[in-house]
Amino acid sequence: MFKTPKPFFLILLWIFLTACTALGTGEPNPYLKTPNGTATSQIESFLAGEALTQTAETARTEDPRVTPTPPITPVPATYYSFEPGIDPLTGLPAPDPANLDRRPVLAKVSNWPREGRPHAGLSAADVVFEYYIGYQMNRFLAIYYGDNSGQIGPIRSGRLVDAQLTNLYQGILAYGNADPQVDEVLIERLGDRALAYKNLPCPPMCGYLTHSATGVYLDSAALSAYAEGLGVDNTSQDLRGFRFDAAPPEGGDAGSILRVEYANFSIMEWRYDPAAADYRLWQEAETADGLILAPATDRNTGQALAFDNLVVMFADYMAYAPSLHDIEIENAPTPQRAWFFRDGVKIEGTWRVPEPDRPIIFETEPGVSVPLKPGQTWIVIVGNSSQIEIPASGEWTLYFGL
């Protein structure tokens, strides 16, 4: 007989209790938007302001060119080798080749509340994952391998999906504590590679109150050294999975803007900068006149937050409670739909996990890897029911949906 794992049993029990006390009342969720996209709570209405309210009135239309991805018979992954000193997560020489003789450090970085912005250290990450955490907010999981940052944050709590992503990239997870049920899953899946604020000295994690907007920051190099001192196996792992090519791919559509809207007060918009040949992040920001979109910067450098590749992974979210989700990544049944942006071009493809504990691979067709631009990659995981809009040529908007 199938035996339910203990951590999952605890989560299911907690879901049941939560449903009885919160979801079973029959009352509408005050944090959800109405069908036309407007905020239904006084808090959201206040945050939305006048500057962005037009986004709530925009009609949601599906891209007529998008069709469901047909089932694909899995084929072996194609893995590309890299010369010594080349970071397999960026395709570029590592600033310090010695960094490649370790496991990656994965750090949980907060995006909410806004008082924690600008974020610190994201511009030094090889890869950043972005995903939904509930109440129309998102959070980041940044991977540091070829490079380090002495100040990363604000660091916030772990989520269930962090166990999957950390295992896929065979890293060490640094997070600012977690709900007991989530904490148990992280520890069971990752063992001594799950390092929470409550168990860490300063350095590697310094500050107070992980629930404060600007409370706690991580030093990635210090975390690697600390983990080794604990006896954690910190030897290098096989992180091949990406393919890099300096030449832009042929075909595709114009891809100058990628906008992901969780609510009309919660927006991530990437704009292609032809002069710099990268994508710059703009986010909603508060002003005396309401919300506007403003350039995001790195707290450490004061420079614009820019990435060379943008990837959208469409995936199934599992919602256990308003702020408790997991995402089907490791065990996704077939290759899943994906978008790829580089050099102002958007191409379609798929993502999949062909082997346990190996990085996600991106393909244009089975066995044919997507050519990413050498550099840093930002990956946003959206729900499969997210709605698509094309406001103008080259502009792609996703309204997040579970």
Image (cartoon, rainbow, N blue to C red):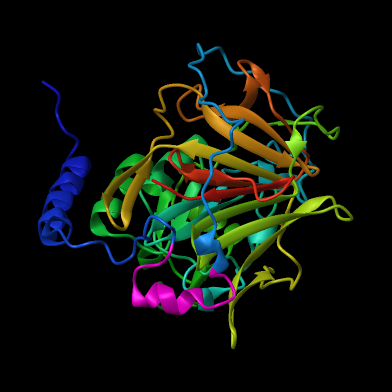
Along the line of sight, the residue nearer the viewer: 326 or 125: 326
Q: Is residue 238 above or below residue 144?
A: above
- Residue 143 position in % (x across, y down): 58, 49
Q: Is residue 167 left or right of residue 258?
A: left
Say which residue appears at 17% left-offset and 57% top-offset: 23
Q: Quadrant of the N terminus?
A: top left
Q: Is residue 11 above or below residue 180?
A: above
Say which residue appears at 64% left-offset and 60% top-offset: 122
Say which residue appears at 59% left-offset and 18% top-offset: 77
Tell me, yes or no, whether the highlighted magenta stretch contains residue 364.
Answer: no
Would residue 183 be visible to someone looking at this image?
A: yes
Q: Is residue 237 above or below residue 213?
A: above
Q: Is residue 293 left or right of residue 321?
A: right
- Residue 282 position in % (x across, y down): 66, 64
- Residue 295 position in % (x across, y down): 70, 69
Along the line of sight, the residue nearer the viewer: 357 or 287: 287
Q: Quadrant of the C terminus?
A: top left
**Residue span colored magenta:** 38-53
Would residue 128 be visible to someone looking at this image?
A: no
Tell me, yes or no, whether the highlighted magenta stretch contains residue 48.
Answer: yes
- Residue 51 position in % (x across, y down): 59, 75
Q: Residue furthest bottom?
A: 288
